[in-house]
Image: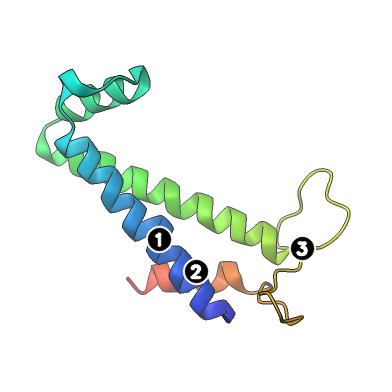
Amino acid sequence: MNAINFVKELRRFVIDFDFDQYKQQLELSKLNKINDEFWLSLVKFYKNLDKESQIVFLSIVRQIKIDNTSLILGILDGNMILENQEEDFILTTQGSSNPINGELQGIFLEMEENT
């Protein structure tokens, strides 16, 4: 897998698929069937919003997912250094010594810009 395909699949899974799952759970969850206190309070909060506010809330959630994914890719690329990090990260696929990191964050942000 090359860098572009890795970012494409990561974006599809983390941003698109996971976001859609999250949205469906918020919209379809029945309050009387939720056992988790955090999830219950979140669903109540979401369902009490008007439609326009729900759209704004979901766009904020999506942007947070984008920002976090970008930060992690930036760390893998070496654009940002962790506090106790002593060596660079090298991301390879099994059976290959060619790193695919170095431009992951830029590829990701470009894909986001083009959607």
Of the image marks 2 and 1, the number of the one nearer the N terminus: 1
What's the amino acid at mark 3?
A: Phe
> Label 3, on which residue?
89
Q: Residue 55, position in %: x, y?
A: 20, 44
Residue 50: quadrant of the picture: top left
Which color mode does the image show? rainbow
Point out residue 21 in the picture as x, y percentages from the top left corner.
28, 48
Give the residue at x 72% y 82%. Answer: 96
Q: What residue type is labelled 2?
A: Phe
Disc ID at residue 13: 1
Q: How many labels does the image show?
A: 3
Query: Looking at the image, is 61 positioned above or below residue 20?
Result: above
Above or below, 78 against 96 in this view is above
- Decide which of 108, 93 is in the foreground and name it: 93
Local packing at callout 1 (Cα closer than 10 Å; few below 14, some 14-19, many 20+) is few
Q: Identify the residue shown where x is 27% and y is 52%.
A: 20
Residue under numbered circle 2: 108
Between the C-alphas of marks 2 and 3, the distance is 18 Å
